[in-house]
């Protein structure tokens, strides 16, 4: 089985600071992979490298067997195929929820608002926001904003979705509604990579969990193995802190 | 041990009676207001009573606050002020547009656009570094001096150009600071959706940046309204020049006071409004 997305020896440096020190990772079509690890271990950076928001310094990233990490390659087609949702939502505050969602499909895929409306309405309805389309981000709760951000990424019809601690900025009672969206996507067979602190969620749904430590994948495996019987001392220490 | 005093319970306090703290703060506020009032009244009284005692007051009053001259010239001044308003009205949009273009030039990142960037830097450096009146003189006298045919020798055209050059440099800097103030995460979000740099600027960054700098730009346009009067040096008979004409006619300075009042009637409300917007924005940010 060839992987949908493959990372080989990916290195990323900020100045003198080595943030990713040679990451190897395979993500198969339809798989859900969770990245766990302490704050500062490089989860966000790794995700940003995957959809070319950060250029990598060394190594290779393959998408469907194509090298997308070649310097000078146009990142835009890649970013259309790999969507990302951020911890802090990053909605455009001057646009309504619906306009947030429609901007990229209109400009990048050349669709009109009328083309988009049925599909966008359907997405909003599916994620329980059918009556919030005309609201501005500051009129929505954190959980609602994060769901709009997910819809915004989905509207580009990506093949892979990256989620960077998307529930970390939410009040505890709002986490559930966002995790439900992820469950829904999982059910639809979306290929997903999540940086997350929701260990229960990772254990329940992930195909594979990777423990990042200081820019390396120190340990990876099926959730039951990694959570139930971690091999590395540092994994054990981390899990005992967060569980 | 003798019981000297014991805290008494005050359960009987009714719900809408002020709390101890509210009562105390109301007292402090009343006191502050009283002091402010007394000090203001004494300063005003001192001015009203003492200034007329000055030896030259009679002369000053006759020269600057002459009711008859004021009444005779005020309508004419208002008429002339219409010209200021018109010059302002066609300059302001040109300035806003030019300022935006220059700001975008300065923000150009592609290497091929480096000349534009350089142009933007040189432009803003030069025109922010010169007194407005000097630019008006150089352009307003210099260019028509080339012997251009009518209407191209009109001081309106070249005076307007001078205002546009200087003020667009300031507006460009303000817009650029607005662009810088938009958090990188907004650009990241746009890029992650596959939007081009151009579309990111046009649909995501600029609309937010411009909204953020509305109050700062309002202050610039208030300054512009005042500086329109400088065009009088190269010809147009706007309110300042008209006041000068009246001054000579009546041998009296009251027309200048009239002109000042007309300016203030416009600029004070505008300044207050800009401050109000600025405060509102600061509050929203914190
Ligand atoms: N743009 C950047 N410039 C410099 N250092 C960065 C940048 N982004 C992240 N880092 C550094 O890289 C390290 C990993 O950060 P990050 O990927 O955000 O980790 P995590 O998401 O696991 O908390 C941190 O030490 C952080 O300070
Ligand atoms: Mg992070």
Image: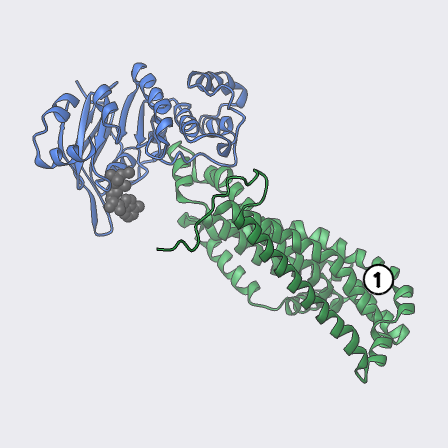
Quadrant in which the N terminus of chain B is drawn: bottom left
What color is chain A drawn in?
blue
The chain coloured green is B
User: Is A100 drawn above or below residue B178 in the view shown?
Assistant: above
User: Is B232 drawn above or below residue A76 in the view shown?
Assistant: below
Whether disc 1's CB lies below 8 Å from ligand 1 is answered: no
Ligand 1 positioned in quadrant? top left
In-image side of B183 versus A112 (left or right): left
List x then y, in percent, for residue A100: 48, 30
At 34% from the left edge and 20% from the top edge, which residue is drawn? A180
In-image side of B153 versus A35 (left or right): right
At 39% from the left edge and 41% from the top edge, which residue is drawn? B185
Which chain does the residue under circle 1 lie in? B
In-image side of A58 versus B107 (left or right): left
List x then y, in percent, for residue B238: 79, 62
| Mark 1 lies on residue | B77
At 13% from the left edge and 36% from the top edge, which residue is drawn? A237
């Amino acid at each position: 089985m060839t992987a949908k997305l493959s990372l080989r020896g990916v290195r990323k440096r900020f100045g003198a600071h080595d943030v990713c020190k040679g990451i190897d990772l395979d993500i198969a079509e339809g798989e859900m992979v969770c990245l766990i690890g302490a704050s500062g271990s490089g989860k966000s950076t790794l995700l940003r490298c995957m959809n070319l928001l950060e250029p990598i310094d060394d190594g290779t990233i393959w998408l469907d067997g194509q090298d997308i990490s070649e310097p000078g390659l146009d990142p835009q087609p890649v970013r259309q195929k790999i969507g990302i949702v951020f911890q802090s939502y990053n909605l455009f505050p001057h646009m309504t929820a619906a306009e947030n969602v429609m901007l990229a499909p209109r400009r990048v895929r050349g669709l009109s608002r009328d083309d988009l409306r049925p599909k966008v309405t359907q997405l909003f309805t599916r994620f329980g926001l059918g009556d919030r389309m005309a609201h501005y981000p500051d009129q929505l709760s954190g959980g609602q904003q994060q769901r709009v951000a997910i819809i915004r990424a989905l509207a580009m019809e990506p093949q892979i979705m990256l989620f960077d601690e998307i529930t970390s900025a939410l009040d505890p009672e709002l986490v559930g509604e966002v995790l439900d969206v992820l469950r829904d996507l999982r059910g639809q067979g979306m290929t997903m990579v999540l940086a997350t602190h929701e260990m229960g969620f990772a254990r329940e749904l992930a195909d594979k969990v990777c423990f990042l430590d200081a820019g390396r994948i120190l340990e990876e495996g099926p959730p039951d193995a990694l959570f139930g019987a971690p091999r590395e001392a540092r994994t054990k220490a981390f899990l005992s802190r967060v569980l | 041990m003798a019981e000297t005093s014991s805290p008494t319970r005050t359960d009987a306090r009714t719900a809408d009676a002020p709390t101890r703290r509210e009562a105390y703060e109301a007292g402090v506020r009343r006191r502050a207001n009283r002091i402010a009032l007394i000090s203001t009244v004494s300063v005003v009284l001192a001015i009203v009573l003492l200034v007329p005692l000055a030896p030259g007051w009679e002369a000053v009053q006759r020269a600057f606050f002459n009711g008859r001259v004021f009444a005779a010239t005020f309508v004419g001044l208002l008429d002339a002020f219409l010209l200021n308003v018109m010059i302002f009205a066609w300059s302001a949009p040109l300035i806003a547009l030019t300022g935006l273009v220059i700001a975008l030039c300065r923000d150009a990142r592609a290497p091929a656009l480096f000349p534009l960037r350089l142009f933007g830097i040189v432009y803003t450096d030069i025109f922010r570094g010169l007194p407005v009146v000097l630019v008006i003189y150089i352009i307003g006298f210099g260019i028509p001096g080339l012997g251009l045919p009518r209407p191209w020798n009109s001081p309106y055209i070249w005076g307007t150009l001078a205002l546009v050059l200087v003020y667009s440099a300031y507006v460009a800097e303000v817009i650029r600071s607005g662009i810088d103030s938009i958090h990188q995460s907004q650009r990241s979000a746009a890029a992650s959706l596959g939007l081009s740099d151009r579309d990111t600027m046009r649909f995501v960054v600029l609309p937010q940046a411009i909204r953020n700098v509305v109050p700062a730009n309002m202050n610039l346009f208030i300054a512009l309204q005042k500086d329109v009067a400088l065009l009088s040096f190269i010809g147009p008979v706007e309110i300042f020049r008209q006041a000068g004409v009246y001054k000579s006619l009546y041998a009296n300075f009251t027309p200048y006071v009239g002109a000042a009042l007309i300016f203030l009637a416009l600029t004070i409300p505008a300044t207050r409004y800009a401050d109000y917007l600025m405060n509102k924005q600061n509050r929203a940010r914190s």
